Image (spheres, grey):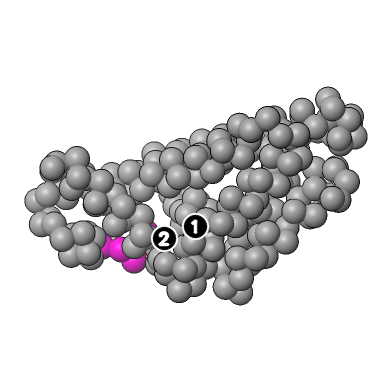
Amino acid sequence: MADDTRTRLVQTARALIHGSSYAEVGVGDLCREAGVHRGSLYHFFPSKEAVGLAVIDANWEVLKAVLDEAFGSEAPPLERIDAFLDGFTGMLTAARERMGTVPGCAIGNLALELSGQPGEAQRRIADILTAWERYFRDAVAEAALRGHVPAGVDADVAAVRALAYLQGITLMAKAYDRPALVAEAKTAVRALIGAPAH
């Protein structure tokens, strides 16, 4: 029962924050929406910041599942990148169907909002972005070994470019309420990593 309450609090906080912002979601809002008393929240989380950290971790678990599914396949590396972009687009589309609008990237939104504040949240977000880059970097490095991208491509630089572009186009998808912008990004991502268009 206690685990169910904690899970409900985290999932409710994820939805509320993704639908608006960390700053806009108060403890009272969270408790009301989750159907719990403040005492129950503080039993699991000593502060709103602790709830925020749990939300960051939960968002990473969801994203990591999509990354692992796409990049863990035996498909050629460029197809793995495409598969991830398809999965990421699917996440945005599903969120739009639930929320009525594209809420953007849950990690990217929190990065914009919390990264300027030194502390644990900033560190965790930076760690997530570094791990996310690693998926792209490993795929680009393998593509270079296979001759699918030019041998001189710097996989680290290519990974940063790809993730930066993905975050930017996701922001545009949010602004225009068009998740398809991310799906249409495959050609641009391939160009950024030095791969031929498909």
Can residue 49 be seen here?
A: no
Label 2 belongs to which residue? 18
Asked if the residue at tag 2 contacts the one at tag 1, i.e. Cβ–Cβ closer than 8 Å, the answer is yes
Q: Quadrant of the N terminus?
A: top left
Does 37 sit left or right of 186 as displayed? left
Q: Is residue 64 magenta?
A: no
Identify which amino acid the numbered label 2 is placed on.
His
Which residue lies at the image location 13% right of the left edge and 57% below the top edge? 36
The image's mark for residue 74 is none
Q: Which residue is mark 1?
A: 109
Label located before the other in sequence (1 or 2): 2
* Image location of residue 94, percent across then percent down: 49, 61
Between residue 76 and residue 194, name the one nearer to us.
Answer: 76
Q: Is label 2 in a helix, a strand or a loop?
A: helix
Instruction: Please provide the residue range marked out in magenta.
Output: 22-26
Q: CA distance from mark 1 to mark 2?
A: 8 Å
Q: Residue at x 41, y 60 (%)?
A: 18
Q: Give the camera-side residue of 88 and 130.
A: 88
Residue 87 higher or lower than 44, as above or below:
below
How far across and how far down the image is residue 108, in percent? 53, 53
Name the spot of residue 96 as percent of width and height, x first.
49, 67
Above or below, 70 relative to 51: above
Q: Quadrant of residue 44?
A: top left
Residue farthest toward the front in the current orientation of the protein = 74
**Secondary structure mainly formed by the magenta segment:** loop
The amino acid type found where label 1 is placed reads Asn
The kind of secondary structure element at disc 1 is helix
